[in-house]
Amino acid sequence: MSELRLMKGNEALAEATIRAGADAYFGYPITPQSEIIEYLMTERPEHRTGMVVLQAESEVAAINMVYGAASTGKRAMTSSSSPGISLKLEGVSYLAGAELPAVIVNVSRGGPGLGTIQPSQADYFQSVKGGGHGDYQLYVLAPASVQEMADFVSDAFDIAFKYRAPVLILSDGLIGQMMEKVVLKDQKERMPDEEIIEKYGDWATTGKKDRERNIITSLDLQPEKMEARVHRLQKKYEQMEKEDLRYEKIQCDDAEYLFVAYGSSARIAQKAVQLGREKGIKVGLLRPITLFPFPKQQLFELADQVKGILSVELSAGQMVEDVRLAVNDKVKVEHFGRTGGIIHTPEEIIEALELKIIKNGSN
Amino acid sequence: MEVIDIIKPENQVFSKTCLMTDATLSYCPGCGHGTAHNLVMEVIDELGIVEDTIGVAPVGCSVLAYDFMNVDITQAAHGRAPALATAISRTWPNKYIFTYQGDGDLAAIGTAETIHACNRGENIVIIFVNNGIYGMTGGQMAPTTLPGMRTSTSPHGREIETMGSPLKITELIANLPGTYYVTRQSVHTHKHVRKAKKAIKNAFNNTRLKKGLSFIEIVSNCNSGWKMNPNESNNWMEENMFPYFPLGDIKVKGKLKQKS
């Protein structure tokens, strides 16, 4: 039965992982996401659904455990925060190369380096521009509420298995730590082993029975074969752009100015839209829900309607590059955002809109 | 009498296991990898467990193990095979999971994964082929390279003062409570091959009985990396490797063997 609870974002994600019928979680503690593994260890999902939870010896081991489970057709997840995600990226690249389905969660914090444990959105480049090595993309979901922390888990597994590709849930310390009410979905049954063998028998390494052996690898020493693999991956990414782009338009119909913001910044920008309109500024918000694929066409079209665009994120300016690419110089695009763990206020966002776009000559 | 008349099925006393593919081995002539591969496959064949066996291949010379081993195999990132095997074993507790790794993979870059999988006592088999050198990348120094041994990254010989001593990781993990069976074997003579096969069979039986982690080191040669012919390399191995890495069981049924 679905259930209404008051939960932290991290806890909601952990509970939703059990309810999504996941087979395994492998993690390593790091602030501000440790509640995920703490919640799972406390809940003992091995008794509830048979799901495996294991604290690995490192972030590197955890992502490679995910790789192992995923190679056998199991639904596996790992989570971490920015510095830990950096460590995982070799494994993420291998997952993409070997075409394995898996879910990775980043409850991001400020960087670079050890940075800060406070919220940040400075991992946009790392999430959507590869991060690891090679020609790959991650499908990236950016939750903006505790509800979406819960809902995006099963969405992420669905996409991961649809494309046999790793999926990243890019959250941040704000969404992970804050408490909101959340409607939890019903418990989904874990897929029985026999069904995994039947359903994924054409690729998963579940034991060679009544078929040729299955091999999982990302290695192709012959250039022609490797190029074919790279092309196969690019086809998946094209299909993701066509079929699985997600975004939300808030008060865009009559907008003369536009905010573009995702995750926690989208929540704050939504308030800024309200403040702006009270001041007589007709401003709307485009919230990318997927950061890859990115709502390029939607931005390109909105650029014909608005006088200027402010990209708002808790970083020194990362997503703004993709906004500019999409807008293609049709209107002025500027960035605003605080860093280092400081969270911008709706008032600061309106001020930035007035200063950088409205007064400074939008075109 | 023609040869074909002699090689009749009823006259055959030996046949290749169907779990070795017909692909030509990519290993140098004289290398121990082919024999080690064959032993693992023979054991899986004889135990009749191929339907429930999942292998994990490393990075190194045996990165292409999946070309030769006719079982389901996942190829891991460098050093991470025990992490993969952990997850596969945890999510498929009734399967037989083995890793096949070299010394650079298992005892250098993968040290943490090796030690922690052993310490948790994962119900897996680790086959560790130790030839004291990085073969695939062209003969660089390994964690198990002997003192004074010349490699492309220790061209003046391994200096203990600056490069440390060869790592006896097998003795190290034998001291962890999680390991059940730890042994060191070789595959350079018929006698040693038979002993090694017995050890590998013992290891897979331990998995069946859910006894925990079985660790089999195979001290082997690398005639190309050592720049010797196969015979010389086997002799050199006996004279130099075996004194540092003595053959025999180190831990049996969870108990360390007393040194004689």
Image (cartoon, coloured by chain):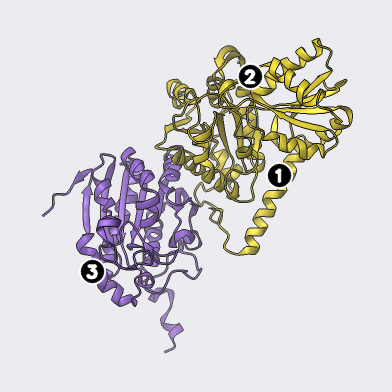
Chain colours: A yellow, B purple
Chain under disc 3: B
Query: Is B64 left or right of B41, judged from the image as shown?
Result: right
> Alpha-carbon distance for marks 3 and 1?
54 Å
Question: In the depicted view, which residue is nearer to us: A146 or B153?
Answer: B153
> Residue farthest to the left?
B260
Question: What crowding class fits label 2: few (fewer than 14 Cα within 10 Å), some (14-19), or many (20 or more)?
Answer: many
- Using the rendered image of the protein, determine whether residue A313 is visible from the camera's viewpoint: yes
Label 3 in the same subunit as label 1? no
Q: CA distance from mark 2 to mark 3?
A: 65 Å
Residue A237 shows which numbered tag?
A: 1
Question: In the orientation shown, which residue stands out farthest toward the bottom?
Answer: B1
Is residue B214 shown above or below A255?
A: below
Secondary structure under tag 3 reads helix
Q: Residue furthest front?
A: A360
Position of residue A228 measured from the top left corner of the image (x, y, whole percent): 67, 58
What amino acid is found at the position of numbered circle 2 in the picture?
Answer: Gln
Look at 73% across and 38% down and name the residue there.
A322
Residue at the spot 41% in from the left edge and 36% down from the top edge:
A56
Q: Which residue is mark 2?
A: A147
Instruction: Please name the residue that numbered disc 3 is placed on.
Output: B238
